[in-house]
């Protein structure tokens, strides 16, 4: 199925790595697939079990069609962190369960290529993406959760100002078993009640 859809640009030549942050587009199936195949073993402890289609280009062509519809409906936003030439996915940022009035909230998820770990790219990219959600989607609250043993995620969220709110028992089915997660949130201190819906 083909569709007309222009990806949303969040940032161009962003950070010292000169990366682009934008929503996924119809022609991205191959490079997104390559990202997840390349990082399959690395992401396994932190992700749900994926079906076989998740690691195929055809599977991603179908998935991107669905993700584009969610973006059009302002119910989800699937962002790619790309190298300067936009030929390689370096990371993924997702905003799901986007809800307007009266909640004005969404959930944040993210992953970063194993080779890009430790250089500050995720922090700078998340900062840009969250600012976009606050200003363009009028979000009041962005929620994120992480596995207690995932200290890298804990540090990224803490550095961004996400506040710990507790621990949810058996919160998500990760790597084939229900696992506890630390719950955090970031609140938009400049939120306005202007009707954006």
Image: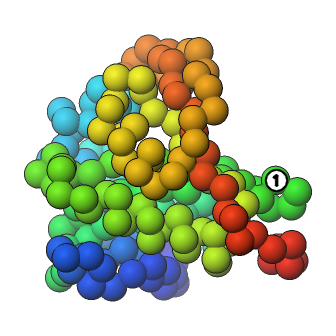
Query: Is 164 left, or right, of 176 in this rendering?
Result: right
Residues 195 and 175: in front is: 195
Residue 74 at least partly seen: no
168 vs 158: above or below:
above
Residue 4 is situated, as x and y percent measured from the top left of the image, at 52, 84
174 vs 123: above or below:
above
51 vs 37: above or below:
above
Q: Residue at x 81, y 74 (%)?
A: 192
Residue 118 is situated, as x and y percent measured from the top left of the image, at 18, 50
Q: Residue at x 42, y 27 (%)?
A: 147
Residue pointed to by mark 1? 103
Query: Is 141 left, or right, of 18 in this rendering?
Result: right
187 vs 166: above or below:
below
Q: Residue at x 26, y 76 (%)?
A: 15
Report which quarter residue 21 is drawn in.
bottom left
Query: Is 34 left, or right, of 52 in this rendering?
Result: left
Residues 98 and 57: in front is: 98
Q: How is the image coloured?
A: rainbow
Residues 7 and 146: in front is: 146
Q: Residue at x 36, y 42 (%)?
A: 155
């Amino acid at each position: 199925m083909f569709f007309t859809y222009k990806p949303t640009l969040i940032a161009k030549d962003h950070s010292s790595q000169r990366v682009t942050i934008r929503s996924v587009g119809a022609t991205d199936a191959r490079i997104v697939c390559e990202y997840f195949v390349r990082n399959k073993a690395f992401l396994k402890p932190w992700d749900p079990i994926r079906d076989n289609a998740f690691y195929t280009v055809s599977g991603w062509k179908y998935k991107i069609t669905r993700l584009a519809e969610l973006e059009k409906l302002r119910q989800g936003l699937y962002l790619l962190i790309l190298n300067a030439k936009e030929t390689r996915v370096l990371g993924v940022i997702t905003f799901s369960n986007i809800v307007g009035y009266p909640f004005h909230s969404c959930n944040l998820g993210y992953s970063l290529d194993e080779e890009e770990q430790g250089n500050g790219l995720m922090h700078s990219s998340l900062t840009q993406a969250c600012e976009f959600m606050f200003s363009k989607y009028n979000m009041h609250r962005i929620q994120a959760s992480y596995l207690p043993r995932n200290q890298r995620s804990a540090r990224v969220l803490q550095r961004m100002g996400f506040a710990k709110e507790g621990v949810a028992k058996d919160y998500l089915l990760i790597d084939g078993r229900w696992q506890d997660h630390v719950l955090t949130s970031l609140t938009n201190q400049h939120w306005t009640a202007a009707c954006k819906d």
